[in-house]
């Protein structure tokens, strides 16, 4: 559950993440929760516009719930499979 009125400290260069992202030369895999209120699906889609090679695995869940939500056969099975096939 998202807590309201909580201070979150971000790195000092966080506003420069677009430039940092553009300079990354390695493949990127991002897990995106459709119900994520912190790193919204819309923000992830905007990242894909900047860096189309980003592979996104979307799931029905919130922030940091990918491992749990992507568990079918065993804990994290689809999460692990996505990483292995990346």
Image (tube, rainbow, N blue to C red):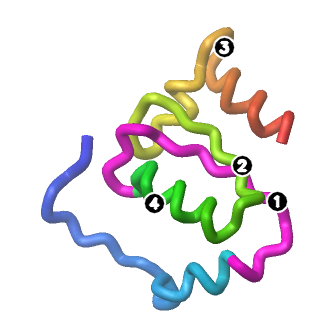
The residues tagged by marks 2 and 4 sit, at their Cα atoms, a distance apart of 14 Å
Numbered disc 2: secondary structure = strand
* Disc on res. 74: 3
Is disc 3 in contact with disc 4, using a CB cutoff of under 8 Å?
Answer: no
Q: Residue 54's x, y, as percent?
A: 71, 56
In the rendered structure, which disc, 2 or 1, sits on the residue that comes first in sequence?
1
Numbered disc 3: secondary structure = loop
In the rendered structure, which disc, 3 or 4, sits on the residue that comes first in sequence?
4
> Which residue is at 78% across, 39% downward?
83
Q: How many residues crowd mark 3 within 10 Å: few (<14), some (14–19), many (20+)?
A: few
* Disc on res. 43: 4
* Disc on res. 55: 2
The residues tagged by marks 3 and 4 sit, at their Cα atoms, a distance apart of 30 Å
Q: Residue 22's x, y, as percent?
A: 71, 79
The residues tagged by marks 2 and 1 sit, at their Cα atoms, a distance apart of 8 Å
Magenta region includes residue 28: yes
| Residue 4 located left or right of residue 83 | left
The residue indicated by pointer 1 is 27
> Which residue is at 64% across, 46% downward?
56
Residue 71 versus residue 44: which sits nearer the camera?
44
Is disc 2 in contact with disc 1, using a CB cutoff of under 8 Å?
Answer: yes
* Disc on res. 63: none
Specify the segment rendered in magenta.
22-38
Q: How many residues crowd mark 2 within 10 Å: few (<14), some (14–19), many (20+)?
A: some
Residue 49 image-quadrant placement: bottom right
In the rendered structure, which disc, 3 or 1, sits on the residue that comes first in sequence?
1
In the rendered structure, which disc, 1 or 4, sits on the residue that comes first in sequence?
1
In the rendered structure, which disc, 3 or 2, sits on the residue that comes first in sequence?
2
Figure disc tally:
4
Q: Residue 21's x, y, as percent?
A: 67, 76
The C terminus sits in image quarter: top right
Front of the two marks 3 and 4: 4
């Amino acid at each position: 559950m998202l807590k309201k009125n909580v201070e979150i400290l971000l790195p000092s260069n966080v506003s420069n993440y677009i430039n940092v992202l553009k300079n990354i030369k390695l493949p990127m895999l991002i897990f995106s929760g459709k119900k994520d209120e912190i790193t919204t699906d819309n923000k992830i889609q905007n990242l894909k516009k900047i860096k189309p090679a980003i592979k996104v695995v979307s799931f029905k869940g919130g922030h940091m719930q990918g491992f749990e939500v992507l568990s079918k056969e065993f804990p994290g099975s689809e999460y692990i499979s996505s990483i292995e096939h990346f």
